[in-house]
Amino acid sequence: MNDKLLRLKKNSILRNMCAETSFLSDQLIQPIFISEKITDKKNIPGLGDNYVFNINDSFRQIENDLKNNCRNFLLFLIPSQKSEKDFNLDFQSKTINQIKKNFKDDIFLWSDVCLCSMTTHGHCCLFDEKQNIDNHKSLNALSKIAITYANAGVDGIAPSDMMDGRTSKIRLSLDENNHDLIPIMSYSSKFASNFYGPFREAADSSPSFGDRKHYQLDYRNKNDALRASKRCAEEGADLLMVKPGVYSLDLIQPINNLTGLMVGAYQVSGEYAGINLASEKNLLKLNEGLFESWHVMKRAGAQFIITYGARKSKELGFSVK
Ligand SMILES: [Zn+2]
């Protein structure tokens, strides 16, 4: 038998015809950071054309992104006031409200729900007086945030804290407050990873003591990662996610098989920065590196991808339909 893989690679029409994975710009989600305390947009080291914006500049960025077929956003809101327990959510509420009022259903607006940008200590949870995680109080705070964001008009909620039982608590709270149609995209298998550095800089969320290994997953453990996603599915998550995306390729299809739910991949800041910085040193071409990394996540079974390069989707040839 004359087995030739070259035969089906003759030109782009034939290669496109035979592409096992292809996807649309709406399957790419663009993170966007908005801070209450900054006046001029702030560079995020390693993340190229991603910035921390004030509300006005974020509007201009979203307008621009829309022209480039990018209309699916994941919002990270950074208030100037930090607290240990009583969170003032006025800035977050106002920002979501203004964005949705302005862009209406031209965009789909997910919001990250966590405590680390709001707490004085920078952890994703609240602590009791003995400095142990207070899961119960953390869930109450998280569900309050989710309801506030939903009331402000957000389209979807993305809890990233990794507390026990957060998905069911948030689902129940949303349902009780007439938000039963708001989907939850849960950070269901999120590892305590070394690749979150640029993000923490942007979100002003570095823990002031310890690390997040008490609540995020140990990257050595596959079974825990499957169990965490299975539990989020059972608690009512609509969409699941692995994070960091490229470093969790082995989990995407197994989670989908286990739960029957669609699984996305978050190409986290450190992963994105690796490609971006290599391109700045002329070691690879940014767009081609991104294109490959996204297709690899697709090949591994990712339904959608959260990436700091989503706004390049038109440039890279992704279509809306
Ligand atoms: Zn957090």
Image (cartoon, rainbow, N blue to C red):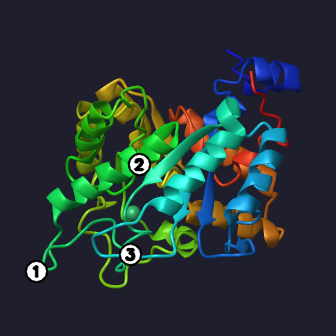
Q: Nearer the viewer, residue 218 or 14?
A: 218
Q: Residue at x 79, y 65 (%)?
A: 279
Residue in the foreground of this view, choosing between 150 and 314: 150
Which three-letter amino acid code belongs to the residue tagged 3? Gly
Q: Where in the figure is residue 302, as x and y percent of width and height?
A: 52, 35
Screen quadrant of the N terminus: top right
What residue did someone put label 2 on?
Answer: 148
Q: In front: 58, or 285?
A: 58
Report whether residue 70 is seen.
yes
Q: CA distance from mark 3 to mark 2?
A: 21 Å
Work out whether mark 1 precedes mark 3 in sequence or the reverse, and give the earlier one: 3
Q: Compared to 83, does 146 lie above or below?
A: above
Which element type, helix, strand or loop, lies under badge 3? loop
Where is 12 relative to 31, above or below?
A: above
Q: Which residue is mark 1?
A: 130
The amino acid type of the residue labelled 1 equals: Lys
The mark found on residue 122 in the picture is 3
Query: On screen, 60 above or below 7?
Result: below
Within 10 Å of disc 3 (Cα), the crowding (few <14, some 14-19, many 20+) is: many
In this image, 240 relative to 103: left or right? left
Residue at the outermost right position: 11
- For ligand 1, the image quadrant comes to bottom left
From the viewer's side, name the closer residue of 250 and 42. 42
Q: Secondary structure at mark 2?
A: helix
Q: Of the residues under marks 1 and 2, which one precedes in the sequence?
A: 1
Instruction: Tell which circle, 3 or 2, labels the residue nearer the N-terminal end.
Output: 3
- Asked which quadrant contains residue 282, the reply is bottom right
